[in-house]
Image (cartoon, helix red, strand yellow):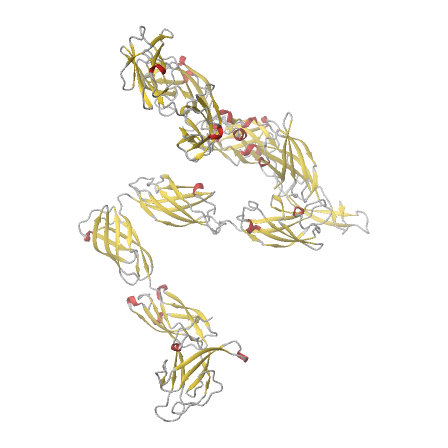
Amino acid sequence: YAEDADGIRNVLVLVPGSTTAGAAEGTVVFFSGNAARQSSATFSITYKNDALPVVTAISPSAGEHFGGRSVRIEISNFPQVTATDQVTVTFGSSGAITGTVTNIISSDPPSTATGSDVEPPKTELLVTTPFYPGIAAGAKTEVAVTVTPLSATDKAATGKTFQLEHKLAKLRTSSGNFGPLRGPTTGGTFLSATIDYFPGGTTAGGVGVEFGDVIVPASDITVLESTNFATQLKVKVPAQTAAGTVKLYIYSVSLSKANPPIGVPVDFVYFDILRPALSESFVQPSLGCINRAPSAQKETIYIEKMPAGANAGNVTVQFGTNAAKAVDSVTYVDATTAAIVVGVDSIAAAGTVAVVVTYGADQVSLSYELYDCDVPFLISYQPSPAKGVYTGGAKVNLLVSKFASYALSTLTVTFGTVAGTVESTTAAADGTTATVIVVAPAVLVFDVITATLKTTAAAYEVSFPFTVVEPCDYSEHCATFGYIQNPVLIAADKPVDDTCEDSYCLDPNTFPVPSVKSFLPSTGYTQGGTTVTVLIANFPATSLSDVLVSVGEKTATPISLTDKGGTPAISELVFDMPASPINAGEIDVVMKADFAGISAFRKTSAKFRYFLPVIGPAVVTQASPTEIFPNAVPAQLSIYVMITNFEALDDLTDTSQVKVKVGGVGPISVTSIQQSNSDFTVVYTALPNGVINSAGNQNITVSIYGPSESKAGTFVVYVKPVPVPLFSSIFPTKGLASELTSIKVFAKHMDPLTSTFDTTATIQGASGGSAAVTVVNVPQQVGCTTIYCDLHQFDLTLPLNPDGVLFGGLATITISGRGRTVTVPFTYLASNTPNVKLVDPSTGSSLAGTVSTITVENFPAVATKDQIQASVDSVGAVTVNSFALLSSQLQVGVSVPASSKAGTFGGRIYRSDLADAYGSWDFLYVQPEPTFSPIDGTTDGGTVVTITAFWGSGAGTATDMAVTFDGKAGTVNSAISNGDTGSIVTVTTPAADAKGAVVCVLTGKSGFSTTFKFEYFTPPTVASIQPPFAKVDGSVADCAECLSDNDKETISVWIDNFPEMTDVASVQVRIGSITCGATPASSCYVKSFASLVKTGDAAGSKQAYLTVKVPPQTSGQAGGADVQVTFTGKAAARE
């Protein structure tokens, strides 16, 4: 109980349990028994039913039918268990098989807290899967998993399934696991073999091994190890009667040789050891120098099984095409091995020569390599062949002649076009050779490339082949043994080639269960921010990224992780507690470790008690925006917040004082503190990417952090949902089933960062066949940073129809990139179906026929154009004018008929007797743009407008049509349909309330309509004419008001609301019956014009000013005459 200075009382109440679910009311009585001061307050609480246990996760979720796979099972609301014999796990529903519980990783006690935000108790078990019979070889099946506490069998948990697979045995064919695959005809050598998924527990009598037609007896087969995951054999090779290649079979006796579980047989090579041959101590190729006298270059050749009696007089050696010659000496090293010394012939050209040693009827051949020994050359390199992973790091040792004098600083090495590293060079004691160690760089080419070592001290270089390979997939390799990869060891000692080493795997069952040794402090305020230090034994986290600290539905913020050593190993974990998800009270803090990101979770927990602060909560009064998109760019997540009942902050530059938290993520320091006083505080924050990544309402909390107690206020931001990817367009839409087809696909709402390298595509045919699609190019988006504006282009090459090249049908393309997927339709045309390649032109008037050429391939043979028929869907037959066969394509000249409507219409072309085997094509009918005249009129209405709309005859007559001007009905006077010239419609404008441009719509029958703009203007009026009279001879009085041309023969005319003139030709003046011209050659003409700006009541409005020469009155009679001024030019667009 606590009371603050304002009289606000905070009472912490421990609520008793209830035997029934539902709402209940509680009462707090203050000053009980004191009638003068006693008062009470009520509160309500809802009791919930204890939830039934449910299996929430199984990892891994699949394994082999023979069992032995170690899996982690997580159950919520499970009764607490402390020993493996307190729980059973069964696989399958009918005739369920029981697995073996090997470890209780963790098991929470029942929670005393209630509410939707309370994390239910969890139990994690380690279980070994049992043998599950009845699954056919190569098949898979899903079985239910049931976890039952023996103390309460009615609390059995289900909810997840486990996939079991009967995997076929597979022989490991790498040289380290299988071989050697050659031996003498006498037999007696040993062959090693490792087989994955061979029947576990196999003995020698259960293994069948055959070399050709020779069956190996069980006494010559040793089973070194046999588990369900792998079996290792050692086989004594039997003798054969003749040298050559035989087929080697290894199989399970229970399955027989006819169905070997390791796949196809392999080749084994027998050789005859009874005849002379090169000794294994002789390493080819031998090396020598060109241009050396035989006396200066001696070689020793060791030959095994050499018959007795060989000597320098009866043994010859031939180098290349040179004549055979006697040897220097023959010495028997032992009873069957002879050492033959011979001088090498003097040969001028470098290269490989064949060397043949002859003794009687026996000959032994070898290769001898000759070099120019006066310049550097590569003697050998190790490893051979040289190879390394594309990420680089592989080392190659080069033995180079004549390289000892070159310093390390003068040496460079390139692998293809990429520079590598020369690590060291070491000269031999005699100075003739140097050992150079080079390191391969990262090379993104999976192929054999040429590596070249150069010296800048001289123009010398040596080269060797280097194979770039992908590293071993340890996740797959280790899974073969039921283990997982060890990413810590892989990161510390990165593999440099594609060899898979078992030492990089580890058994997840060896992880001990962590336990808390110290947890301080164990209490803090509900607003969070308490820094907790925990000492944990056996905590298998290697970095903070491996750690997840959960407090109810919220997540704490890890600060540091330190290895303290000791036995068992102690880790120190420091983190900040989040704001309480349960208000005040005790809650479990669960600390999980995901070993190096491989989902091998281990966890432990401790209790933490939240206390209420002694003052009331802060209140968010304003927040902007209230709607945002999920994280795309930081600018979209910029939020301004005004919060009251918040501590005034003195230092506005210290943004760490105020932090925000989104759901369970945070706290995150604000970007800036805009203002802070005793009344309110305004902060601005730009939330980083990834904080908000799901649609719906998000609670955002703003809190004070610092030496004083924390205060927090919460507001809600609505996150708009992310749209699903949509297919927009594809071109072309079809292609031959027997050809590769290049297409372009446009799709909306993919990830804007989707690129060629992270896009994959597949296609599934109409009958279910599938194949990979080649992703040629995915251009990067420019100017689009969110998923909402994305319109991605995918350039793809489709394979042949996976259903077969003789079949057509609608196929489905699936494009995936950066976690988003879109499907696209595509039509395969059977290889014997006509395929239209080009329609030129493919567009024409909807009101007139169009002459076009259709180019089609795979068209049946025709002799006359009458055998070719074509049509346009919903339009009619197409006239075939001509045809010509060009190469493998048929060009058909056609006349496409007119259509009553615009739009794209499908067409067909086929031989007259094969109507079902047609080629499809599209034709776009377009209508000419409508015309309107005049384009403007007065606000009084009554202007007759002529509209030519290219509708054809389907729009009906004048009585079927209607016209509106800015929503007001006009009058349709007449309508004439005249084929290509369109429907000529005359309408009369209604009066308008104001001048300006308006939108007008003319509609007819069958959905025809045309929209156009019409501009209303105020009718012009003559404001003044000076002088207002003239004599019959055309002369006028002097005019003081006139602005120009005051020559006693000219009048001035002022006109309001007149269009702006550009020259005298843009106006026509009529005085009486005389129309004035534009030049002095006329008796009456417009002399000048000007645009004036009015003053007074109409200040700012424009007025037209004209001067006009007055013509003489031809009749000679005095009297009045009308002055008419007409605008004949083209006015500028009115505002």
Q: Quadrant of the N terminus?
A: top right
Q: Is residue 166 visible?
A: no
Q: x, y (%) of residue 41?
A: 73, 50
The answer to whether residue 47 of the structure is visible from this angle is yes
In the image shown, does 834 or 168 lie closer to the viewer? 834
Q: Nearer the viewer, residue 781 or 594?
A: 781
- The image position of residue 643, as x and y in percent, is 66, 53
Q: Where 1103 falls versus 244 (above or below)?
A: below
Q: Is residue 113 above or below residue 379?
A: below
Residue closer to the observer: 289 or 95: 289
Look at 36% across and 40% down and name the residue there.
768
Location of residue 618 in the rendering, given as x and y in whole percent from the top left corner: 68, 51
Residue 177 relative to residue 15: left or right: left
Left or right position of 1007 against 1054 = left
Q: Position of residue 1023 (x, y in %)?
A: 47, 83
**Which residue occupies the extreme bottom position in the image?**
1117
